[in-house]
Amino acid sequence: APDEVGTLARSFNVTAAATAARLSELTARAERGTRLRIVAEALDLALDEGDVHRIVEHAMGIIAPGRPMELLMSAPDSTALHQVAVNPNGGAPNCPVEDTASCPAIRRAAALTFEEPDAINACPMLRERPTGPCSAVCVPVNAGGVLVGVLHATGPPGDPPPPAVRDQMVTLAAQTGARIGSMRTLEISRVEATTDGLTGLANRRMLNATLADLLRTSTPFVVVVADLDHFKTLNDTYGHETG
């Protein structure tokens, strides 16, 4: 009705609708936060990078069910990118990028959204796909200060992953990079502590640890010692690095 009671009723209806929408938004945000906390805890328990990839795949199915998404990573001694995780519910976008230098998100060290593949400032990798042109969100993965990969999700042209999915991708990429970074740092420290820097051979510390394990488990073993005659002459002639 057009009277004061009717006006008051309409105001209550508008307020109730706005409150319900806000409550729904806050509930969805809380659920996303809970899911990402669980993913972070799972990543902390990962034993190796294979475990990390498996957890990332599970997380993809949670944050973007039905949407193509993949994680491309480079090995510690390489810049080549390889697909290591795929959304189990949405499949893989199969980005053709070959190395870190060819990925705009990695080069710019920032999450990028491409709405139209034909836009002048769109990533050229979005135009020539076996499934046709697409939109995309690309989030770089930073592992200990080194950009080592990209989390990549696609959609139809003009319909990239929404802001809520993008935000979760940014969080997932950060969590993944932190865990992989710590794993690779520990592995580098382990290698440096147990091998000779010049030859890559096991050092005395590794020898002691290996012998201790064999003795503790009563495992039979043999020690073989080899010697080169007149090795000093080789060092004096060609230098110790060559020796």
Image (cartoon, rainbow, N blue to C red):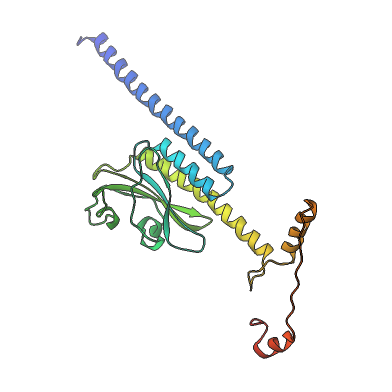
Give 58 or 231, whichever is nearer the viewer: 231
Q: Position of residue 234 (x, y in %)?
A: 69, 87
Count of numbered marks = 0
Specify whether 66 is left or right of 46. left
**Where does the image place residue 179, in percent across and percent down from the top left?**
55, 49
Q: Is 131 situated above or below 62? A: below
The foreground one among 126 and 140 is 126
Q: Where residue 93 sits in the image (x, y, percent)?
A: 33, 47
Q: Residue at x 28, y 12 (%)?
A: 9
* Percent coordinates x, y for residue 106 in the rendering: 40, 57
Outermost residue toward the left in this view: 2
Q: Quadrant of the C terminus?
A: bottom right
Whether residue 169 is situated above or below residue 196 in the rendered picture:
above
Q: Is residue 193 above or below residue 179?
A: below
Residue at 35%, 42% (x, y): give it: 91
> In which quadrant is the N terminus drawn?
top left
Q: Is residue 176 left or right of residue 152?
A: right
Q: Residue at x 77, y 61 (%)?
A: 208
Instruction: Please identify the quarter of the rendering in which residue 16 is found.
Output: top left
242 lies left or right of 89: right
